[in-house]
Amino acid sequence: MMESYVTVRERASDEIVIQKSRFLCFASPCDSEEEALAFLEELRAAYRDATHHCYAYITGTNGGTMRYSDDGEPGGTAGLPIISVMRTLNIVNCCVVIVRYFGGTLLGTGGLVRAYTEGCKTALSAAGVVRMELTSHEFCEVPYSAWDSVRHEAKKFPVRITDEAFETAVTFRLSVRPRDRAEALEALTRAAGRNLTSIPEEESFDPWETDGES
């Protein structure tokens, strides 16, 4: 089973201006081709007066579906640079749309390639590149007397503690990547004086920060 993939955290946008042309740069997570096309159509409708709506999307955690369009720009100068940036970063389940308002100055083939490359990077930066990793979740319970020790020990591991509740005992949700699960649980159990109980929950893909490298 695939343990991770790279995508963007959220829908976001930013803008760059090159030779008086405005490039509105959008990126959004999209789990399917239908979601990517809906995102594109929404932007086409919102910016129907723009000169071009160039885009690229890759869907499927294995990058099974890839599409791009120059939307009237010279062939290979817009959609291809956008998807090339995405493929270089191994980004999937994502759609990038660059909306251009022509400023009156021709950029030339090289200028367009550079502009749409920069536009894609700008969109991805705004949306936040993250690594979605297979994550195990445990429902845990410890006595009040062990809680401080458990929290202190947890700081030594790449884990997340959420949903704390303080009733007859302290309960919380522990999220951890499978490769770290056994070691982290053993350490937290020791910290709790062997008084930690845990119940496995369903695994999911959760975002973990990435520097953009594969």
Image (tube, rainbow, N blue to C red):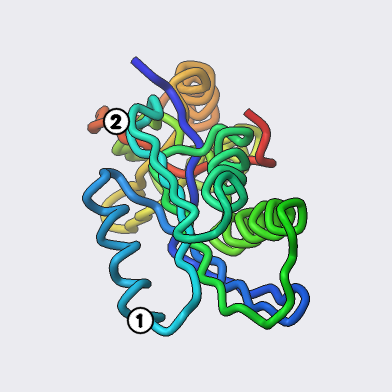
Front one among 71 and 87: 71
Residue 137: % across, % down: 34, 34
Front one among 171 and 157: 157
Q: Residue at x 48, y 60 (%)?
A: 72
Bin the neighbour count of mark 2 within 10 Å (Cα to Cα): few under 14, some 14-19, many 20 and up: some
Q: Nearer the viewer, mark 2 or mark 1?
A: 1
Q: Residue at x 57, y 48 (%)?
A: 82
**Relative to 84, is 20 on the left or the right?**
right
Q: Which numbered disc, 2 or 1, marks the residue that appears first in the sequence?
A: 1
**Which corner quadrant holds the N terminus?**
top left
Please, what is the three-letter code of the amino acid marked with disc 1? Ala
Residue 63: % across, % down: 40, 29
- Is 155 placed above or below 63 here? below
Residue 126: % across, % down: 59, 64
What residue is disc 2 on? 203
Please, what is the three-letter code of the amino acid marked with disc 2? Glu
Q: Residue at x 53, y 18 (%)?
A: 183
**Relative to 170, is 83 on the left or the right?**
right
Picture quadrant of residue 16: bottom right
What residue is disc 1 on? 46
Residue 53: % across, % down: 45, 66
- Is 47 placed above or below 108 here? below
**Which corner quadrant holds the C terminus?**
top right
